[in-house]
Amino acid sequence: MNTTKPPYLGFGLGLRPQHYEEILSGSPAIDWFEVISENYMIPGGQPLRILDQIRERYPIVMHGVSLSIASTAPLDMDYLGALKTLAERVNPRWISDHLCWTGVHGVNLHDLLPVPYTQEALDHVVDRVSQVQDFLGRRLTLENVSSYVSFGQSEMTEWEFVTEVANRADCWLLFDVNNVYVSAFNHGFSTDEFLHGVPRDRVVQFHVAGHSHEESHIIDTHDHPVCDEVWDFYREAVTHFGPVSTMIERDDNIPPLAEVVAELDIARNIAREVQEGAQLTAAE
Amino acid sequence: MTSLKELQESFQAGILAGDDAILGEVNDSAREKRTVLFGVYRNAYVARLAEILGEDYEQTHAYLGDAGFAQLVKAYIDANPSDQRNVRWFGRHFPDFARETAPFANHREVTEIAALEKALADAFDGPDAAPLNIDAVAAIPAEDWPYLTFQPHPTAIRLAFDTNAAEIWSALKDETAPPAPVRLPEPQALLVWRQDLMARFRPLPAEEAMMWAEAARGVRFGVLCEMVATFAGEDEAELRAATYLRGWIDSGLLAGCRVETG
């Protein structure tokens, strides 16, 4: 099993078909791309051909949405086989998915559904992560999701659960800055507690995204620019974790590439300011 | 305590069947009631799948209009909980569903427009195969030609339409007014395939459609020529068969050929 910590890649974007042409013709200043694994788990044709071309120019990370690691349904070995085949073609720097479930009894709800933070769920997830890592021959990277409900039966906080999964299953973490912000608002916990509650050395990637504020709750829609509050929390995250590969997610109302690249520059500037501030402090 | 398995079953039933038992397991937040919060998951399920169907069946949507398409989409989502990890294949039964579901079942062109969209999508990301090269075929000695068999490109899909759905689709794609739907006197064969990374289609004349179907079954070229002669006359039958074949090769419809003398 490859247990080497993934490298720091800088500032990346989600690869979206709307931007294929601009990326291939313009070689924009983007350090790396994250691809939705399922979009390329197809027999052939243009999407895979374009992915091959982009892979030659940029580092790629694979990000799945239907591993369903926390489901009580059996692991889908066909899915895992297809994921492994794609990884052999793409040679991603790491493979991530979500700490969630997507369905049971052969149904897929195509959503990132929340887990009760119980000992039973913890044991179950840890066992499943180990099986998947053994099959893929590499460590997985798991992302905290946005959630809208909490369970009465939960016995620990989300960050305690995430920490236990990471330490016991020996996997990496994708710290979704927006998801922590959304869930903190929805469930009334402190973003700082989450930030300081997860193991620093496990975090290999940040996600930053926009959301929809519904006053009484926030929905993780990825259809808006990143808001100021999330950028503020990103600054705290960079300060706490140090340089972590950062990527902006945009899945709906997808703007021209230049607009997302400009958002990425905000992340670059924040990270630079934090680093310069840290150097200044060290020099004093 | 409810087991994780039971909790997930209850959660799923809450989304799929509107079952409220799950509300006994989740909390109100400080700002909102649990019915509203769980409703986020209920709404997202239908909205996400409807969006996918709208992307997959863009011209069916344009043809039916927002209200008609929404009705068909809602019925499809209710009847077909997704059993696919990849949402790419959630809508694969949509054309058949339209054929069997009132009132769309009475409008044959609806299922056929959807079938054409599905075939184009399947050709677009279907399996890769190098197209048969004309030089490779030209190099085959003349005496071997009667024994040649042909392998269709793996993306090639043959459809047979009872209506002018292909014309309607083309008009909608061009954002022009579609012709009125009509039943055709004879079924219209269509070939859908991928060439140069683009999904495309074309109607097939009856004779060519017959020869394609037989060639795809592995019938040898010599026999194909005899079938063409039987179909529309012996006069220049071999030339007609060779012309169809040349067209298939030029448009990337074939992935291989081999001499079968056994």
Image: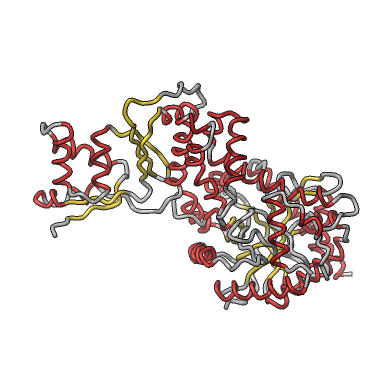
Query: In this rendering, would B247 be left or right of A153?
Result: left
Numbered label tally: 0
Residue located farthest toward the left when viewing the structure as drawn? B143
Percent coordinates x, y for residue B141 in the rendering: 12, 51
Most foreground residue, A268 or B105: B105
Percent coordinates x, y for residue A46 in the rendering: 46, 49
Most foreground residue, A159 or B40: B40
Percent coordinates x, y for residue A132 in the rendering: 59, 72
**From what the image shows, is residue B164 above or below residue A153?**
above
Q: Residue at x 45, y 27 (%)?
A: B168
Percent coordinates x, y for residue B33 in the rendering: 86, 50
Q: Is residue A178 visible?
A: no
**From what the image shows, is residue B118 above or below residue B218?**
above
Quarter of image, res A34: bottom right
Query: In this rendering, would B232 be left or right of B189?
Result: left
Q: Residue at x 56, y 44 (%)?
A: A22
Q: Is residue B84 visible?
A: yes
Q: Residue at x 38, y 48 (%)?
A: B155
Check the picture and name the quadrant holding the C terminus of chain B.
bottom left
Most foreground residue, A252 or A257: A252
